[in-house]
Amino acid sequence: TFQLSDKSGKMSYAMSGNLLYGRQDRPSHIVTEGYDAAGREVLRRVAWDGNRGRLLAIGLSPRINWNLGAGEVITSQNFINLARSRGDAPETVVTSLGAPPRYVATATDAENKMEMLRSDLSWTKRLAEGAKIDAKFGVNYAHRDSGMGQLQYYPNDVLALDRDIDSDFSDKGWSSTGKYSRPVGQGHAIAVGWDGAYSLRNETRLQHETTTVGAPIVNRDESFEIGRAHV
């Protein structure tokens, strides 16, 4: 992480940020046992799982202030976040008692990308007789792209199913708030303002499966779009 700031005349700024990098390798195993009504063991499986991956994430938060004098200030605040991750998760199931599962081995690879941006601009102005105007406008954008490939096998390393899943998500919009206030009489004040926002969300998921040995497949395409607004 880091943070720095400075000032020059009527302008001041501050910048903070962070960088994250991580790796993991977490093998594990799961034992599944099954018994009949007489208490005899009829099923015993061991699933050997791997879980390897890496992550890189960057975050920045720049802020700039302009003091224009006479009680007038403009502030720009921004947030930027980026992340990338990739991993694989192989699994092998060994059945020593009972029927084996449909697929005795699975190889999974996944990759994810994420971006998030937000920018807010605010303005404050002090007026005569104690009056004040506060206004703020912001825009935002978020996006995530994920992909997963999966191979599933029958016994004897026979490739049964080849699956690809791609998903995409985005959310973008704007918001605006503001208020005018001024004192009225002794210990009283009047204020009027506004508050509005709009956002549009899109999401898609595409699943495509193929087989050369007659395994059951599921192909599915899904898409959603949601718009939201309030005043």
Image: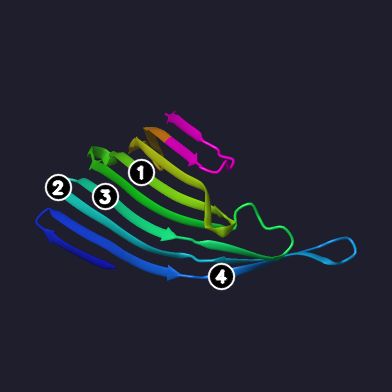
Disc 2, disc 4: CB below 8 Å? no
**Dot 2 corresponds to which residue?**
69
**What span is in magenta?**
203-231
**Mark 2 or mark 4: which comes first in sequence?**
4
Q: Amino acid at mark 1?
A: Ala
What's the distance in space between the residues labelled 2 and 4, CA to CA?
63 Å
Q: Amino acid at mark 3?
A: Gln
Of residues 5 and 178, the one drawn nearer to the viewer in this rendering: 5
What residue does disc 1 label? 142
User: What colouring does the structure picture have?
Assistant: rainbow
Numbered disc 3: secondary structure? strand
Name the residue carrying label 3.
77
The span from disc 2 to disc 1 (Cα, nearest Å) is 36 Å
User: Which numbered disc, 3 or 2, marks the residue that appears first in the sequence?
Assistant: 2
What residue does disc 4 label?
Answer: 28
Q: Amino acid at mark 4?
A: Ser
Q: Amino acid at mark 2?
A: Gly
